[in-house]
Amino acid sequence: MIFLASDHGGLDTKKELARYLEESGIQHEDLGPFTFDPDDDYPDFTDKLVKKMLETPDSKGVLICRNGVGVTIAANRNKGIRAGLSWNETHAASSRRDDDTNILTLPADYVKIHEALTIFKTWMNTPFSNAERHKRRLAKIL
């Protein structure tokens, strides 16, 4: 299961990602927002997504805001969450392979929608390496 959420700054990117997942038959849940509200706050949507992920074993998430930093910070406050901000395919693959990220965060102001889709696909298709050094490092922070 993939959970999606954003704030107003990431709404358009999130809608396109949700459309891609729907068309691809990939199980997902869009947690909002569903309409543009310039006064909404990313921590509210981040908390909703993290709660769903922690209730759903082996799920993944995508959070989107203007620069991606706020949602990353908000998500990583939670035990069991490993959110990583990525802005290109190479970085997204590295975040999965080396750090086993379970949330991809995207900066809507810095990646075009088609780039966000490519970054997401790469992130989803890159497995954790299970290399001993990476498992050792993750054990120290989990």
Image (cartoon, rainbow, N blue to C red):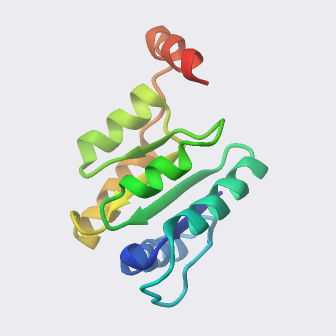
Q: Is residue 79 left or right of residue 102?
A: right
Is residue 108 something that shows in the picture? yes
**Which residue appears at 68% of the width and 43% of the height?**
58
Is residue 16 something that shows in the picture? no
Q: Is residue 127 left or right of residue 115?
A: right
Q: Is residue 47 above or below residue 126?
A: below
Q: Is residue 74 above or below residue 126?
A: below
Q: Quadrant of residue 47?
A: bottom right
Q: Is residue 111 left or right of residue 24?
A: left
Image spot of residue 94 (x, y percent): 33, 33
Can you say which quadrant of the picture contains the N terminus? bottom right
Which is more toward the observer, 115 or 83?
Answer: 83
Image spot of residue 133 (x, y percent): 44, 10
Image spot of residue 49 (x, y percent): 63, 60
**Which residue appears at 34% of the width and 39% of the height?**
93
Badge count: 0
**Which residue appears at 51% of the width and 72% of the height?**
41
**Which residue appears at 23% of the width and 64% of the height?**
111
Judged from this view, the residue extending furthest toward the front is 39
Can you say which quadrant of the picture contains the C terminus? top right
